[in-house]
Amino acid sequence: MKVSEIKKTGCISFDAGDEVYEVASRLVEAGRKEAPVTRQGRFIGIITLSALAAPFARANVVDNPNSAAVEKAKKERIEKYVSTRMFMKIYLEPDMELSQAVAVLANRNAECVPVLDKRHRLIGGICTSELWKTIIKAVGKGRQAKKPSGAVAKSRGDDTTIDQVLAAVRARGKVTAAEVAVQLKLPLQTVEEYAQSLEKYGLLKVEYDLFGKMTLKKIE
């Protein structure tokens, strides 16, 4: 089975020249935490709500929502906030076999995986929930396992595993991703990736504040 046969879903995308406020508003409205970004039609990386919080934080939007600094932040282009790190630029191709798509999931936890043509142009996206449904049906397991696989947990070669992130949340009940990152000496982006994966498996709850700051909560 090929990627082109998997059900396509409404994966929104943005251009590198789009404005911060417009993009943040559309992500929130769509209930998304991230989306692919293109420049002249070519995929360049992923924009996240967490990254978009930075310009508003610098402008002190809470205390001065109508200030000139906030207005300037709203009109910034998203290009400089796009994550272009290798694991954020993982994508699918229409002629990929399902087995290759599984390997992609092991290296990139995402809401929507971009689908690109041979010229690296964005032609759509596949929701990972639909991809998982196809995978589970194909292997006849019926339901997703309750714990992420070792491939997901250690895909980036970190000494600290996804299990330690989960343990940190369970120990405190409620903690920000930034606090976990400091505690475990991990990049914030890595903690957020792990948290999103754990949430998909029903092992913790992820919440965001107005500025995209992630909080992790223990599930009783």
Image (cartoon, rainbow, N blue to C red):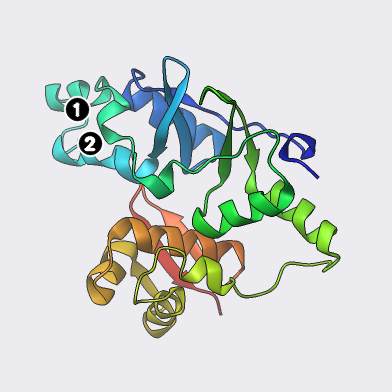
The answer to whether 40 is drawn above or below residue 99 in the figure is: above
Q: Which residue is at the front of the view, 183 or 27?
A: 183
Q: Is residue 211 visible?
A: no
Q: Which residue is at the front of the view, 34 or 121?
A: 121
The residue identified by callout 2 is 56
Which secondary structure, mark 1?
helix
Q: Position of residue 166 (x, y in %)?
A: 45, 77
The answer to whether 85 is drawn above or below residue 158 in the figure is: above
Q: Is residue 69 left or right of residue 84?
A: left
The answer to whether 172 is drawn above or below residue 4 in the figure is: below
Q: Is residue 148 left or right of residue 163?
A: right
C-alpha distance separating marks 1 and 2: 6 Å
Q: Which residue is at the front of the view, 216 or 160?
A: 160
Q: Position of residue 64 (x, y in %)?
A: 16, 33
Based on the displayed image, in which of its 4 quarters is residue 114 positioned?
Answer: top right
Q: Residue at x 24, y 72 (%)?
A: 185
**Quadrant, the N terminus:** top right
Based on the displayed image, in which of its 4 quarters is residue 97 positioned?
Answer: top right
N-term-proximal mark, 1 vs 2: 2
Q: Number of marks in the image?
A: 2
Q: Is residue 15 left or right of residue 219?
A: left
What's under tag 2, amino acid-wise? Phe
Which secondary structure, mark 2?
helix
Which of the labelled discs sits on residue 52, or is there none? none
Q: Position of residue 51 (x, y in %)?
A: 31, 42
Based on the displayed image, in which of its 4 quarters is residue 122 positioned?
Answer: top right
Q: Position of residue 34 (x, y in %)?
A: 46, 40
Q: Residue at x 33, y 65 (%)?
A: 176
Q: Is residue 18 visible?
A: yes
**Cβ–Cβ below 8 Å for labels 1 and 2?**
yes
Which of the labelled discs sits on residue 70, or is there none? 1
* Outermost residue, top side: 40
